[in-house]
Image (spheres, helix red, strand yellow):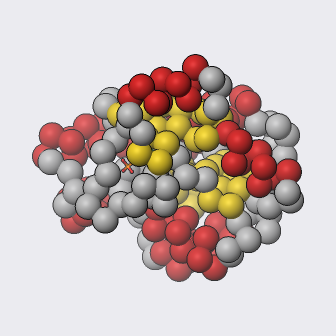
Amino acid sequence: MTSSRLTVVSGPTAVGKGTVVSALARQHPELFVSVSATTRPPRPGEVDGVHYLFVSEAEFDRLVHDDELLEWAVVHGVHRYGTPKAPVVAAVEAGRSAILEIDLQGARQVKTSWPGARFVFLTPPSWEELVRRLVGRGTESAEQRERRLETARAELASQAEFDHVIVNGEVGQAVADLVSLVRL
Ligand code: 5GP
């Protein structure tokens, strides 16, 4: 596919990608926001088919084997995450703009497979603030947090690969910045 109707939002753990993309989707229901498949178990409150498609290792293998994913990656060294291809293609073919919220490895794959896509990197106001948000979220063990911060360090170093960088200091402003970049 080649279309500027695809926007990829990436950025380090706990920077608030989910919050910013959900707020964008609420303001612009005409946008298609991709629901990823993952082998990670659901966190309390997460709903299958809404936050993620929670799949088994065998089902993820099948999705990869049958070429049903636009991209996929092992994130934070543990679970697999991937973007189901058909819903994104269908949305874009229907004239909608589509948003993917994925990690750096996935963004790099989309860069190769979808020329014309736009790449946005969400960054925290500071490293200290990122650590504060991750700890404040309280959903990870100390060991998981360490692993995520390690990935975050590498991801922050990749900003130059993206078309746009948005600092997520205040959610409303970050959403407004993102709206100005997405083809509505
Ligand atoms: P979490 O487990 O906190 O929901 O997500 C962990 C990471 O996985 C986040 O950085 C998120 O951007 C990334 N992620 C979520 N869905 C996908 C996907 O479909 N593909 C890729 N490559 N990364 C994803």
The answer to whether 126 appears left or right of 120 in the picture is: left
The answer to whether 117 appears left or right of 167 in the picture is: right
Q: Is residue 135 above or below residue 116?
A: below
Q: Residue at x 61, y 53 (%)?
A: 34
Q: Position of residue 2 (x, y in %)?
A: 85, 40
| Quarter holding ligand 1 | top left
Q: Is residue 55 above or below residue 128?
A: above
Q: Residue at x 71, y 66 (%)?
A: 31
Q: Position of residue 132 (x, y in %)?
A: 24, 62
Q: Residue at x 46, y 30 (%)?
A: 59
49 and 116: which one is in front? 49
81 and 136: which one is in front? 81
Q: Is residue 57 visible?
A: yes
Q: Position of residue 111 (x, y in %)?
A: 70, 35
Q: Residue at x 60, y 72 (%)?
A: 24
Q: Is residue 46 above or below residue 37?
A: below
- How many marks can you see? 0
Q: Position of residue 51 (x, y in %)?
A: 45, 58
The answer to whether 25 appears left or right of 112 in the picture is: left
Q: Is the N terminus in the top left, top right, bottom left or bottom right quadrant?
A: top right
Q: Is the C terminus in the top left, top right, bottom left or bottom right quadrant?
A: bottom right
Q: Is residue 177 visible?
A: no
